Amino acid sequence: MEQRVREAREAGDSLAILQEWVPLVEISPTLVRAVLVAEDYRFREHRGIDWVSLAEEVRWSGDDSFSWWSAPDLGALADAVGYVWSNREEMRGRSTITQQLAKNLYFGTDRSLLRKAMELVLAPRLERRLGKDRILELYLNVAEWGPGIFGVEAAARAYFGRPASSLSLDQAAALAATLPHPLTSSPARSPGRMVWRKNLLLERLDPSSAIPPSPMPLPPPELDIGVAIPEPEALPIDSLGPR
């Protein structure tokens, strides 16, 4: 939030922050499930870092249990580092919700290997100190959902005129589909990309779905992004919720 306000000020604009804190029990379980499926489907299984997804991302070819004394593991590490460096512009990161929370609370959106390394250090600590439900509550209340819109309650009211506790399945999927790129694709801005991701999410949320759990793909570049509709009016809210 501080970063976005600073960026607006440096650009000669002003930005009103729209945010309202709600406890986890007042957030639609459908929205929580949609966010987990969209952003971190192994959230309940890992301890802050999804090593399985990370290994897939960097094309890890070593053993599951890494050893500094293993020549094959060191070779696999060198290959992985080389792959990351060669494809650094396309790397998605596969950040867990816990890593995203660490980024939102402490680092902002600046992309760097140092920030990524610090996330890897902090995420397990957050897991030990806070537990899964508190991490989810914090994340859903501070995540960015659009220009000046932070937290699920503000997003639900701004986009759909209702509290986060009463979101429909379609609305919950739309908000979860907004999370990867909230400034460029949301229910109010370039909704075509959001709808593409939302529909994929709805398929995965269907109890009868045969789609195996896996990271959500990026929309194809040729996708028609649709026509933007008016932005919701952002109202300044002083409180940033419980510390």
Image (cartoon, rainbow, N blue to C red):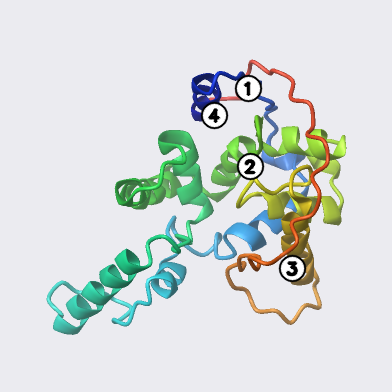
| Identity, as a three-letter code, of the amino acid under mark 4 | Arg
Residue 29 image position (x, y, % from top left): 76, 51
Q: Are marks 1 and 3 in contact (CB under 8 Å)?
A: no
Q: CA distance from mark 4 to mark 2?
A: 11 Å
| Residue topped by disc 3 | 200
Residue sitting nearer the eye, 63 or 129: 63
- Residue 225: x and y in percent read 74, 56
Q: Is residue 165 above or below residue 211?
A: above
Q: CA distance from mark 1 to mark 3?
A: 32 Å
SS for callout 1: loop
Mark 4 element type: helix
What residue sits right under mark 2 in the picture?
183
Give the residue type at disc 2.
Leu
- Residue 4, numbered circle: 4
How crowded pointer 2 is (Cα within 10 Å; few <14, some 14-19, many 20+) is rated as some
Earlier sequence position, callout 4 versus callout 3? 4
* Residue at the top extreme of this rendering: 238
Quadrant of residue 18 in the image? Answer: top right
Q: Residue at x 55, y 18 (%)?
A: 12
Dot 4: within a 10 Å radius of its alpha carbon, few (fewer than 14), some, or many (20 or more) residues?
some
Q: Are marks 1 and 4 in contact (CB under 8 Å)?
A: yes
Q: Residue at x 44, y 55 (%)?
A: 48
**Residue 32 seen from this side:** no
